[in-house]
Amino acid sequence: MKDYKVLSQLGLKARWAKQHDKVYSHIKDNHSNLKLEKARLIGNIMGDGCITSIESHNRFPRHDIKFYPDDFNMANIFMKDFEKLYLKKPKIKDAENYYKVLVSSKPAWEDLINLTDFTSLNWKFPKKLLKSSEEKVEWLKAIFDCEGYVGKRRIQIQSISKEGIFSIKKLLEELKIKSSICVYQRKNPLWNKNYILTIFGKERLLTFHNLIGFSHTKKQEKLKQIAGVPEW
């Protein structure tokens, strides 16, 4: 029985290795033509996702990529991008107020974890990876889709990552969109500071709409209203 179990595990490892080799080759040969998809995926994981690796003594390690959007269009874009990039379609579950998108992939996990830091305290725009203006816009859109708030006359985004918020400000300046940052220190001194970026004013909001916008359906509709975008 023990020998059978060992042989079964070896066979499973061999099948996985064969499947993984296809993805590794795809990453090497095709990701240079999928830069916008990668920019969106990275932004979405930084905003509303996570990357985890779970070790197990009885099973092979799990390499999970998870995404928790509250908009179906965002979930759909993420799933399509992931499948193009890593040849595997994530699973989706409706959790009433949001969607759970989950996929396990060792090649994807290895590729993503080596690209940038996805932790909430240390994330920032990966400038060495995403260089074109189109990639920057897709990353910004994904971040604002996840973390942005659309108010009556403003768009705001906040984070405990100082570098992350200031990297957003710099990218917005490249697009001629002015923004301001304030720091909010919560009552408990052990808690991290919150950095809040605000885009205020109809002209700036209209520029944001025209150059970036939202894939998040409700946020995009609200942005149109406050920016005064005409209905045709």
Image (spheres, rainbow, N blue to C red):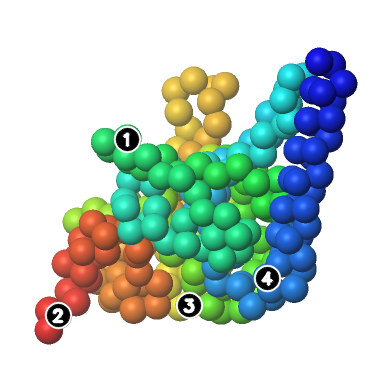
Q: Residue 31: x and y, percent?
A: 68, 70
Alpha-carbon distance for marks 2 and 3?
A: 22 Å
Q: Nearer the viewer, residue 72 or 3?
A: 3
Question: Which badge, 1 or 4, comes first in the chain's sequence?
Answer: 4
Q: Amino acid at mark 2?
A: Pro
Q: Secondary structure at mark 1?
A: loop
Alpha-carbon distance for marks 3 and 1?
A: 36 Å
**Discs 2/4, front:** 4
Residue occupied by mark 1:
95
Question: Which badge, 3 or 4, comes first in the chain's sequence?
Answer: 4
Q: Residue at x 30, y 70 (%)?
A: 205
Residue occupied by mark 2:
230
Q: Residue furthest top?
A: 1
Circle 1 packing at 10 Å, graded few (<14), some (14-19), many (20+), is few
Q: Residue furthest right?
A: 3
Q: Nearer the viewer, residue 37 or 171?
A: 37
**Disc 3, disc 4: CB below 8 Å?**
no
Question: Which badge, 2 or 4, comes first in the chain's sequence?
Answer: 4
Q: Secondary structure at mark 3?
A: loop
Q: Secondary structure at mark 4?
A: helix
Q: Residue 48: x and y, percent?
A: 47, 45
Q: Residue at x 45, y 38 (%)?
A: 184
Q: Residue 76: x and y, percent?
A: 39, 57
Residue occupied by mark 4:
31
Residue 143: tell me if it is visible: no
Q: Amino acid at mark 4?
A: His
Question: Which badge, 3 or 1, comes first in the chain's sequence?
Answer: 1
The numbered disc on residue 175 is 3
Q: Residue at x 45, y 28 (%)?
A: 186
